[in-house]
Amino acid sequence: MADFQSSPDGALFELVARGKKDTFFFNKDPQEASLPLNPPYLPSEPFISETRFTVPKTPILWGRPLEFEVEVFGDILREMTLKIDLPTWLPDLPLIQGQQAVGPQNVNQCCLIRQDPEKDNPPGTRSSSDPTYGWTNGIGAFLFESIELLQDKIRILELSGDALFFLQNAESSNGQAFLRQRQLGEHGGSQTEIGRNATPGTLYLRLPWPGATTDEEPGFPLVAASDQTWRVRLKLRPLEQLLETSTTSETQVIKADPFSKYFYYRDLNNTIVTFQSKTKAALGTPTIQLLTRQSYIRDELRQQAQKARYEIPFRRFFPQTFNICEPDYTPFNVNAAVVVPILRRLEAVHPAGRLLFTFRSQNALNTGRLATTFNPLPTSPDGQFYNAAKLIIAGQDREDLYPPQIWQDLLSSYKDDRYPARRQAQFNWTACAPTTKEPTGTVNFSTADRPNIYIEIQNTLPDPATNQRTTQLLTVVESWDTFVVGEGRAYVKFFN
């Protein structure tokens, strides 16, 4: 006779057969429920999600503002993302010379398109160093000079596309980094990648809406704030600031101008095809839509949600831009090895989880290389703009003086799930990774007395436009606030 033994599975099957499955899963003893490998079974509320696209209320023009009104059709807002399709200066082109032309993206992604030097030079002057042109690295974020999220006429959040680029560059995970970079039009900066970015495809920029910044968050209860109007206000950068070329120089300003120029590429048969690009007037403007994903819940729960009061923690950002000018670099004229400290006052409120900061040269900003954080001075170690940094509050060191390897490499690897790899550093006060879910450790900037960032800068090359050494320091204090929703209205709890 076989020796049959009981098992948890057998008990479960028996209870299911008797219609008493829940008595197996539900555990009413909280002490027992906390034991390892013995979690209670918790039911989840069913919902259905829908995604819609909204067009702006104002025309889309380079260098001008535009505005969306958020369409409320569901009960819970899960995601708010900008969908961006950029125009291109490339006309329709054939994959094989003599055949029918196809869309420029099909050709540009498989055939490297370079500027043709033979229109102004003798034949035989083409080479692998001929320049390529593309939209600036990270165009999906840098397209926007400013981003505002509004409740009626009250501004909830405001930050720049630059700040959002560097924030998102430090979030998510290394496994998802490639997809997020593609969604922003971000690449490694090579000659080929710059050329490919002339047709980056559809881009997506997720907006940091309270309760719906990431997929891990529960969402924003629109059903409990039905008396409000929600809007997104954007300002586009001028076209001239958003173009990049592979030809760079630190001694002269080389701006990308791909319009009305002759280009060439080798088709699929390795035959050289030449063509002329579109004029600037014929380029057109981007197509920008607001993607919102909202969920529907059942009627009984909707009635409860309309009467409930919610307090949603969310991140508020305080970006600041500081110019480090020639007087700051003057001591290097006497002694190249001298320690040159600078002190910059930080303006922020609320409990802050981290402070991001990065440097960019003025020449890089003038030539559309908005994602470039490399110091062009040949003697600068690892292309850094500084030797060490610390944080001072009330005249005392809140963070000790350490080199970039600590603030850039160690903290990013320890506190985040993704390494940004763009020479962006951070002071991070959260207790564990990731830093975007909830405040697990903060410094209260509302009561911080004279918060200053102290940096020992490196020498750099002069800006060729002014012959003055000028760099830009971008800082973003990431604070936490509370959004209160209930009885048809919503408000930020701590607005000071």
Image (tube, rainbow, N blue to C red):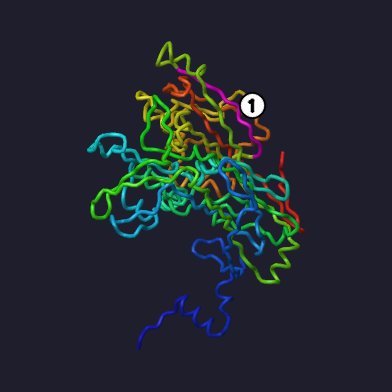
In the rendered image, which quarter contains the N terminus? bottom left
Question: Nearest the camera: 278 or 152?
Answer: 278
Choose top left, top right, bottom left or bottom right for residue 189.
top left
Is 118 located above or below residue 48 in the figure?
Answer: above
| In this picture, residue 377 sits left or right of residue 202 | left
Q: Please tell me which residue lies in front, 208 or 450.
A: 208
Nearer to me, 128 or 469: 128
Would residue 207 appear left or right of 98 to someone viewing this image? Answer: right
Q: Position of residue 157 (x, y in %)?
A: 64, 44
- Secondary structure state at the residue bearing disc 1: loop
Query: Can you say which quadrant of the picture contains the C terminus?
Result: top right
Q: Residue at x 48, y 15 (%)?
A: 330
Whole-percent x and y of residue 436? 55, 48
Q: Is residue 268 magenta?
A: no
Can you identify the residue that label 1 sits on?
450
The segment highlighted magenta reads 339-350
The answer to whether residue 403 is above or below residue 90 is: above
Amino acid type assigned to the residue bearing label 1 in the image: Arg
- Image point 69% across, 44% down: which residue? 155
